[in-house]
Image: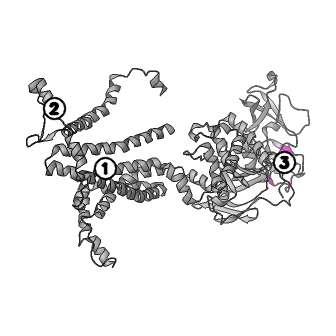
Amino acid sequence: MTAAAHGQPKRSLGQWLVIAVPYLWLVAFFLVPFLIVMKISVSQGAIALPPYRPVLDLARGWKGAENFIAGLSLDNYRRLGSDPLYLVSYVKSLEIAAFSTLLLLLIGYPIAYGIARTPRRLQAVLVVLVVLPFWTSFLIRIYAWMNILQRDGPLNQLLMALHIVREPPVWLSTDTAIYIGIVYSYLPFMVLPLYAVLEKLDQSLLEAAADLGCPRWKTFWLVTLPLSSSGVLAGVLLCFIPIVGEFVIPDLLGGSQTPMIGQTIWMEFFGNKDWPTAAAVAVVLVFLLVSPIVVFQHQAMRGAERG
Amino acid sequence: MQIVGSKRGAAPAADGGARPLLRIEGLTKRFGGVAAVDHLSLDILAGEFFALLGPSGCGKTTLLRLIAGFERADAGRILLDGVDLKPVPPYRRPVNMMFQNYALFPHLTVEANVAFGLKQEGLPKREIAGRVADMLALVKLDNLGARKPHALSGGQRQRVALARSLVKRPRLLLLDEPLAALDKKLRDATRFELMELQRQLGTTFIIVTHDQSEAMIVADRIAVMDRGRLMQVAPPAEIYERPNSRWVADFIGDVNLFQGRVGDDRLSVEGTAAGRLRVAAPIEAEPRTPVWVALRPERMRLTRGKPSPGLENCLPGTVAEIGYLGDLSIYQIRIADGSRVKAAVANSGGSDAAPNEAEPVWLSFSPDAPIVLTR
C-alpha cells in the first residue's frame, strides 16, 4: 500500500504487458460485446439484416451519425416495465435461483464438511468424486434426467415397486424437475468452495470452544459457520448467478407455464426475432446480477484486509 | 512417598495426608498399537505448579489432552476431586486448557474471545463484562479488548489465550507449551509472570514443556516423561541433584557418565574410565554390582597442577576443546582412555589463569559430587 503511495519503480514493457492481458481480454470478450448488446437494446426491431435499426452508416459522414443517434430510444425498456410477462419471468428466475441455492447450501454444506473431516488420503478421492460428473457432457446428463423422470422412467418404477405411490406422479415439465436438475448440476459449485474453507479450519479452535464449555452443536453456530462464511458466500454466488440465467435445465425439464428469464431471452431472439427486446432483457439481467457481485467484492476486500 | 519440596511459601502442603486434586491411575492411551501414555499413575495436589517434561513424542501432550477430555483413555482413570472424569465431556470439565497455538477465535475480538467461556455458562451480561475486564487488566491487555487476534503481537496473543483459559476460574489449568512460540527474551520474562499469576490466583497449573530450564524455573514439581512413562517425579532441585536413573541424569542438564562396579566398602565405584571414584554416602547396592556414576560438569574442578597430594577423585587429562558461553566456558578434557569429560568453568575474570587448548590439566571433584545410579 505504502509502496504505491510513494511511487513504485518504473515498470518494464514486459510487466505492463502482463498486467494488460486480463484487461485486454475483458475489453475484447466482455466490454465490446456488452456495448453491442446495449446498443441493440436501444434500437428498434426491423425486418432487415441485421434485424434492427438504426445502423451506423459512416459512409454518409456526420449526417449518418446524427441519424444514428436520433434513431436510438429507450422504448424497449419501457416495454419491459409495461408487459407483466417480463416481470413474472424475472421473479420466477430469482425465486428458483434463491430457493435452489438454499437447497444447494443445505445439501452441499454437510457434504463439504464430511469430506473435510475424513482422513487426508480419502479427501482427494472424495473431491474427485464430486467433480466426476463434469467428465460427462452436461447436456447428456440432463437428457438422462429426462429419462429418469419420465412417467414410466426408473424413478417412478422404483417408487411403485416400493409401494410409496400408487399412481406414477408426473415429474417432467414441473418446477420440481427444474429443482432436481439444478441441484444435481450445480452441487459441485457449492461443495468445492465450502470444502476449501472447511478443510483449512483449525481443529484446535473446535477443541478450544469445547474446552470453554461449548457443546458441539453450538460450536458449529459460534465457530465453524462464521469461519466458513467466505466459502458460503462464494458457493452461493457461484450457484445463484448462473442459475438465474439458466436456460437448458428449465427448457428440457421444466414446463411451459412460466418461462425463466433465459427462456424469455431465447424466445425473443429466436422465436420473435426481436433482437432489441431480447437485448434489453439481457441488459437488465446483467445489472440485476452485478449488484451481488459488487457485494461479494466488497466482502472479499474486507476479508483480505482482515488477513 | 514423594518428597514435595517447595520453592515458595504458598506451595502445597507436603504431608502425605493431603488429598490430591487430580489423581491419575494406570492411565493408558494407545495410537495404532503404540502406547503414548503407558500405565501412568500420578497425583497432583491443589495449588501446585506442576510440569510435565520430556522429549517430543514422550506422551506429555497426550496426557494433557486426556485430562482435558479431547482423547479417551484405553485404560485407567482420571479423578478430579475424587470424581471420575470419564463420563464428563470436555465442555463440562472444570478444567481449562491453553493451547500451544493459542487457538484464538479469529473472527472474535479479544474481549469476545475472553468472554466466550463465560457466555457458555449463561452468566448475566454485567458479570461477564466485569470479569473479562478484570482478567484483561490482570494480563495487561486492558486497552486492546476491541482488537481482533490478527492485529496483536505474538506475546499479546499469548496473553489473550491465557486470559481466556483463566477467566472461567478452572480448578485446573492445563498449559500446552505456552511459551514455545515466543522469542527468548519475552519467554524469560513471561515465565516469571506466569509464576506470579499462579501465585495470585492459587489455581493448580499443569504445564507441558520440552524445555527443561522452563520446567525448572516455574514448577514446584516436575514429572520427567519418556515413551509414555514417568521416569521421575520430584521437585526441580531433587531431579537435578538426585536423578533416579541414567536417563533422567542425561536428560536434565549436562552430565558425565562413567560405568563401573560398586567397591567392597560401598563407598567407591571401581573400574571406571576415570579410575576409582570415592563417594560420600554408602551406595545402596551390593558390592560388585555394575552401576553408573553421573558427574555434573559444574562440580568438576579444573587445575593446572595436581591437587593436594593424596586427594582422591582426581585424574589427569588434556584440554581438547573450549566452548565459550560468556558467563562460563565448557572444557572438553581428554582423559587417559581417550574419552572426553566435560567441566564447566566460571569466567569470573583473570582469564589468563584459565588453561588453554592442548594444555595438560587435572580434574578433581569432592566425594559428594558423584551420583551413583543403579539403572
Q: Quadrant of residue A36 in the image?
A: top left
Q: Which residues are magenta?
A: B276-293
Three-letter amino acid code at the position of disc 3: Ala
Which label was assigned to residue A70?
A: 2
Rendered image quadrant of residue A282? top left
Crowd class of label 2 (few under 14; some 14 to 19; many from 20; radius 10 Å): few
| Residue under disc 3 on the same chain as residue under disc 1 | no
Dot 2 amino acid type: Ala
SS of the residue under disc 3: loop
Structural crowding at the residue carrying mark 3, measured as other residues with C-alpha within 10 Å and reported as few (<14), some (14–19) or many (≥20)? few
From the top left corner, tell me how far across and down residue A297 is, in percent. 40, 40
N-terminal of the pair, mark 1 or mark 2, is 2
User: Which residue is disc 1 drawn over?
Assistant: A242
- Position of residue B197 in the picture relative to residue A131 (left or right): right
Give the CA distance from mark 2 to mark 3: 95 Å
Which is nearer the eye, B375 or A20? A20
Question: Residue, x 56% and y 59% (percent of image)?
Answer: A216
Residue named by callout 3: B10
Q: At label 1, which amino acid type do we have?
A: Pro
Could you say which is closer to the camera, residue A101 or residue B72? A101
Vertical comparison of A171 with B220: above or below? below
Q: Of circles 3 and 1, which is in front?
A: 1
Q: Whole-Å distance between the Cαs marked 3 and 1?
A: 69 Å
